[in-house]
Image (spheres, grey):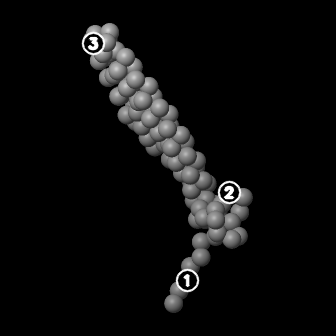
Amino acid sequence: MHSRRVIFMVGLLAAVATPSAALLAIEASTRPSDRASHAAMARHVATIRAEQLVEVANLQSQVDAILTCTRKGKFYTPSKTGADSDGCTDIEVTVE
């Protein structure tokens, strides 16, 4: 499961990094008056990238918690009463 996580993170980082590389190439080929607007766009893209990386980190922590519970043979339900320190609860089967 670890290799899938690494591939996902590398792909996600490559997708996030691509727009700024394109903006830098555009900036190098433009007039000085256009560079200010391209620099503003680059700052905007950097802000968005930072927000995306925070979201990715949050998702990764949730995936790690789910995997921890799965290894224990339990569900990840941290808000449920009786959850252990990892947020895992026993699997309950009801047969009617």
Name the amino acid, label 2. Asp
Q: Secondary structure at mark 3?
A: loop
Q: Residue at x 49, y 38 (%)?
A: 51
**Are the two marked residues, 1 and 2, in contact with CB atoms closer than 8 angstroms?**
no
What is the spatial separation of the Cα atoms under label 2 and label 3, in whole angstroms? 53 Å
Q: Nearer the viewer, residue 20 or 68?
A: 20
- The residue singled out by tag 2 in the image is 86
Within 10 Å of disc 2 (Cα), the crowding (few <14, some 14-19, many 20+) is few
Nearest to the eye among marks 3 and 1: give it.
Answer: 3
Marks 1 and 2, how far apart at CA: 24 Å
Residue 64 at least partly seen: yes
Q: Secondary structure at mark 2?
A: loop
Q: Is residue 40 above or below residue 82?
A: above
Question: Gap between marks 3 and 1, in whole Å?
Answer: 67 Å
With respect to residue 24, does 77 lie above or below?
below
Mark 1 and mark 2 lie on one chain; the one further toward the N terminus is: 2
| Residue at image coords 27%, 12% | 30
Q: Which residue is mark 1?
A: 94
Under mark 1, the amino acid is Thr
What is the number of the mark on residue 30? 3
Q: Determine whether, in the image, residue 49 is placed left or right of residue 80.
A: left
